[in-house]
Amino acid sequence: MRASRRGLVALLAVVAAVGCSGEAGSPASSTPGVSPISSTPFDEITLGVDPGPDRGGAALKAEVFADGAVTFEEYERAMHAYAQCMRDEGFQVDGPVPMGPEVGAALSPGDDPRNFLLVTFPGIVSEAEDQRNSEADLRCQEQWSFAIEKVWAEQNAATGIELQEWLERAWDCARQRGTVLSDPPTELEATLSALDGMHDGCVPWE
């Protein structure tokens, strides 16, 4: 199974082992997007050709960016277009769906998963399929969703103060569970604590 949440490429992307799918529903507070880093360098991928300014991804992006902002509904439309593109490439696709303990999550420090959607590819079982999926993923993302996701992520990015508060709450949750943290505690420990919180309710974004 391969999970793909489209957005900014993050230095840290932790995918919950309970699944590999996503996040829809209503937007919440703050948080930057993340995207698993493809095994294939971006500049080695031949991107899909958009059918023109009045059709396809170019038309969607022109409509979304007409007012200079991205709403959750517009972000959701882009994610659905990306998912359909992957289906057209021949992949089984689940989502976009809301993140949660049943389907999994992809988080970076500062994230509120309620702001983002996740797509899962349950049929990926071999290295060759994963490689083909990565290449199609970049084509579909570039054509339909990356630019929109990037702006959506920037709109929902945590400020420095919000990020520090997120980390402190995540570390506190870990301590409440009896987890022994490093001194000083790390962002990775905070992120793992946040993933645990999707099961026990002690989360840093509330």
Image (cartoon, rainbow, N blue to C red):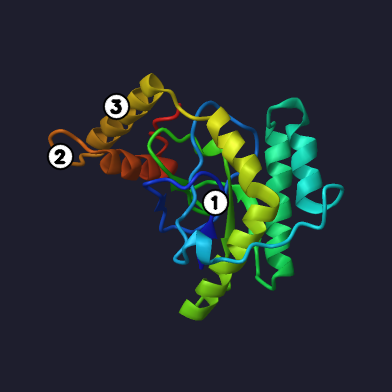
Label 3 Cα crowd, 10 Å radius (few <14 / some 14-19 / many 20+): some
Q: Nearer the viewer, residue 44 or 35?
A: 44
Q: Please say if the residues under marks 1 and 3 sit with CB atoms less than 8 Å apart.
A: no
Residue depicted at x 87% and y 47%? 54
Q: Callout 1, which amino acid?
A: Arg
Q: Callout 3, which amino acid?
A: Glu
> Can see residue 126?
no
Extreme residue in the right direction:
54
Q: Is residue 21 above or below residue 74?
A: below
Extreme residue in the front direction:
43
Residue depicted at x 15% and y 39%? 182
Question: Which of the two discs, 1 and 3, labels the residue nearer the N terminus?
Answer: 1
Q: For mark 3, what is the residue?
A: 168
Q: Nearer the viewer, residue 51 or 119?
A: 51
Displayed quadrant of residue 158 = top left
Question: Which of the two discs, 1 and 2, labels the residue nearer the N terminus?
Answer: 1
Displayed quadrant of residue 115 = top right
Label 1 Cα crowd, 10 Å radius (few <14 / some 14-19 / many 20+): many
Q: For mark 2, what is the residue?
A: 182
Displayed quadrant of residue 82 = bottom right
